């Protein structure tokens, strides 16, 4: 089983008890921590329309709490050179 890597700089919280039904939660972003994390994990960055993207998954634990993890899945291809490992910023 692959190691779970939690994304630094992203924190997810359930909605406040008085929030309307359309509010699903709150995401807090610590920009510097997220940029540092992306640079430390540059091998997982993907290129989409000329922009670098960091693939993540939103998971729900047994206790119902949400977490954001790094999606480390990579497609098998003969040419992996199309994936760039240049820094995020």
Image (spheres, rainbow, N blue to C red):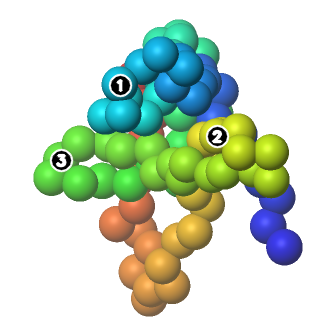
Would you place residue 77 above or below residue 81 in this image? below
* Residue 20 locus on image (x, y percent): 35, 25
Q: In this image, 87 relative to 59: left or right?
A: left
Would you place residue 57 above or below residue 14 in this image? below
* Residue 37 locus on image (x, y percent): 61, 29
Pick the residue in front: 20 or 2.
Answer: 20
What residue sits 54% from the left and 52% below the top? 57
- Callout 2 crowding tier (Cα within 10 Å): few <14, some 14–19, many ≥20: some
Pick the residue in front: 43 or 61.
Answer: 61
Q: Going by the picture, which residue comes out furthest to the bottom?
A: 78
**Can residue 3 be seen in the rendering of this structure?**
yes
Q: Which mark is residue 50?
A: 3
Name the front one of labels 1 and 2. 1
The reply to whether discs 2 and 3 touch (Cβ–Cβ < 8 Å) is no
Name the front one of labels 3 and 1. 1
The residue where tag 2 is placed is 66
Q: Which sits earlier in the primary sequence, circle 2 or circle 3? A: 3
Q: In this image, 42 relative to 2: left or right?
A: left
Quadrant assignment, res 81: bottom left
What residue sits 23% from the left and 42% below the top? 51
Q: Secondary structure at mark 1?
A: loop
């Amino acid at each position: 089983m692959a190691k779970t890597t939690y994304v630094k700089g992203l924190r997810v919280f359930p909605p406040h008890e008085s929030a309307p039904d359309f509010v699903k939660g709150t995401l807090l972003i610590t920009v510097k921590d997220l940029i540092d994390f992306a640079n430390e994990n540059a091998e997982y960055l993907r290129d989409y329309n000329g922009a670098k993207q960091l693939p993540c998954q939103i998971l729900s634990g047994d206790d119902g709490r949400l977490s954001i993890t790094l999606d480390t899945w990579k497609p098998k291809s003969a040419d992996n050179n199309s994936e760039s490992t240049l820094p995020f910023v």
